[in-house]
Amino acid sequence: MRTALFICFSLFLFSCKQSARHALVFQTDFGQKDGAVSAMKGVAFGISADLPIYDLTHEIPPFNIWEAAYRLEQTSRYWPEGTVFVSVVDPGVGSERKSVVLKTNTGHYFVTPDNGTLTLVAASMGIAEVREIDEAVNRRRGSGQSYTFHGRDVYAYTGARLAAGVIKFEEVGPKLPADVVRIAFAGAARLADGTLTGGIPVLDIQYGNVWTNIGDSTFKQLQVKAGDLLDVTFEKAGSFICRDTIPFVTTFAAVPEGAELAYLNSLMNLSFAINQGSFSDAHQVLSGPDWNVAIKKLNPVK
């Protein structure tokens, strides 16, 4: 009887320990050509060999804080409450920028330099609390003289301890005001006087498709049907880049190979592409907080 009770109690403690673990998701601009990403994972594995570790991406363009912000917001909504994201795109490493952990109103955690990376998740998920990482406690042992790899020594270490339940959020460090450094950007898409305007936050980089922040519900206000033509103007920081007439269709197969199209992407945002080509390369349209698009509806294709 005692043996059975002991086994049941042990299983209960084991299940509690298991439930304390959360996924740890890494994002960097390091690429995979050297051992930097592996070093971060090694630090996390050293905290807990059972910690589930995943990659968001390590192909953020070097120093591109805005794209890091976008990829976090694009992806994190699909991960469960309690997931810990470690994002290291840190051109200011060694400067006065703070190392923080953001807890959102959705219960997600983001471990990162406070340099604008949190701009979009703070807006979409809300800020529950922000804490500065206390490096006297939450820093890899023996790394105090290393000043250029905080991703390994501070962020991976702290993120792994938080995800594994070794520390509670309150043990990360001192509480900060409920705000983060934010990158200025155009904001929500809008329709005014028959013209729909929005931003171009990111490219579908593998294929050169141009993704806007114009969601399905906003796009519907323009009353566009499949086959309608769109008059599209692209600008960067208020300067004209190009203007084009593009058909709106529902699938790439609706236009011939090499033809342009407007469509709703997997996030249900209006996007522009060339069937089996790169719209971005063809028109020199890129992405970022200073890129914008203006769209008017023309007549249907005859």
Image (cartoon, grey):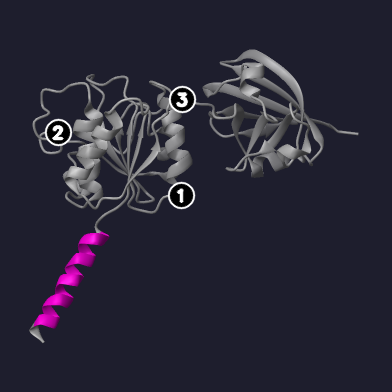
User: From what the image shows, is residue 69 above or below residue 96?
Assistant: below
Q: Which residue is mark 1?
A: 78
N-terminal of the pair, mark 3 or mark 1, is: 1
Magenta segment range? 3-19
Question: Which of the two residues, 117 or 20, is positioned nearer the viewer here?
Answer: 20
Q: Identify which residue is drawn at 22% across, 38% down.
A: 42
Residue 135 numbered mark, or none:
2
What separation in Å lies between label 2 and label 1 (alpha carbons)? 30 Å
Are the residues tagged 2 and 1 within 8 Å (C-beta)?
no
66 horizontally vs 130: left or right: right
Q: Identify which residue is drawn at 12% across, 28% down.
A: 143
N-terminal of the pair, mark 2 or mark 1, is: 1
What separation in Å lies between label 3 and label 1 (alpha carbons)? 25 Å
Q: Residues within 10 Å of mark 2 (few under 14, many from 20)?
A: some
Q: Give, as a three-letter code, the residue at label 2.
A: Glu
Q: Residues within 10 Å of mark 1 (few under 14, many from 20)?
A: few
Magenta stretch containing residue 288, yes or no?
no
Q: Percent x, y for residue 133?
A: 20, 36
Question: Toward which corner of the image does residue 245 lie, by quadrant?
Answer: top right
Does residue 176 show up? no
69 horizontally vs 210: left or right: left
Are the residues tagged 3 and 2 within 8 Å (C-beta)?
no
Secondary structure at numbered mark 1: loop
Q: Which residue is mark 3?
A: 184
Badge nearest the viewer, 3 or 1: 1
Q: Main secondary structure of the magenta part?
A: helix
Question: Which of the two residues, 272 or 113, is positioned nearer the viewer here?
Answer: 272
